[in-house]
Image: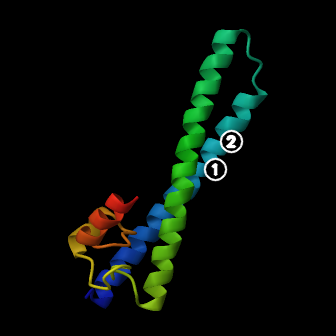
Amino acid sequence: MLTQEELEMFKKKLLDRRAQIEKNLTSTTLELKEMRDLELNDEGDYAAASAETMVDSAIMEQQRKELAEIDLALDKIKNGTYGICEMCEEPIGKARLEVKLFARFCITCREINEKEE
């Protein structure tokens, strides 16, 4: 089990990451708006802008998913269930949580879960 000090450290890291993602999403949204407002001169410009927009949209979608995972992890800290595997209900290793702050499964259950998907 995690100590109160470790929980506070993970909470701070989660909040910092959430702030970073929100900042990224805001700036990417502004960039996309600016691109839409640009007057594109030819099909090459349009194709380049479209490709960049698609990449930015995919990144934004991924960051929104990560934001949802972070919010779930923060709720778990509040509820006292952070760091506990959702499948086997065993503690998730601290090293795993440091790599993936919002891990929902221990390594063993994650592998089982990925095989099922």
Q: In the image shown, does 1 or 91 lie closer to the viewer?
A: 91
Residue 65 visible in this rendered orientation of the protein: yes
Q: Position of residue 53 (x, y in %)?
A: 62, 32
The structure residue drawn at horizontal position 27% and vertical position 85%, both measured from the top left corner, is 90
Q: Quadrant of the N terminus?
A: bottom left
Q: Dot 1 lies on which element?
A: helix
Q: Quadrant of the C terminus?
A: bottom left
Q: Position of residue 102 (x, y in %)?
A: 40, 69
Q: Position of residue 71 (x, y in %)?
A: 53, 72
Q: Horizontally, is 23 left or right of 117 in the view?
A: right
To which residue does mark 1 refer?
26
Q: Amino acid at mark 1?
A: Thr
Name above or below for residue 26 compared with residue 3. Answer: above
Name above or below for residue 101 compared with residue 84. Answer: above
Callout 1 touching callout 2 (CB < 8 Å) = yes
Residue 24 visible in this rendered orientation of the protein: no
Q: Dot 2 lies on which element?
A: helix
Name above or below for residue 52 compared with residue 17. Answer: above
Q: In the image shown, does 113 or 63 lie closer to the viewer?
A: 113
The answer to which image quadrant residue 100 occupies is bottom left
The answer to which image quadrant residue 37 occupies is top right
To which residue does mark 2 refer?
30
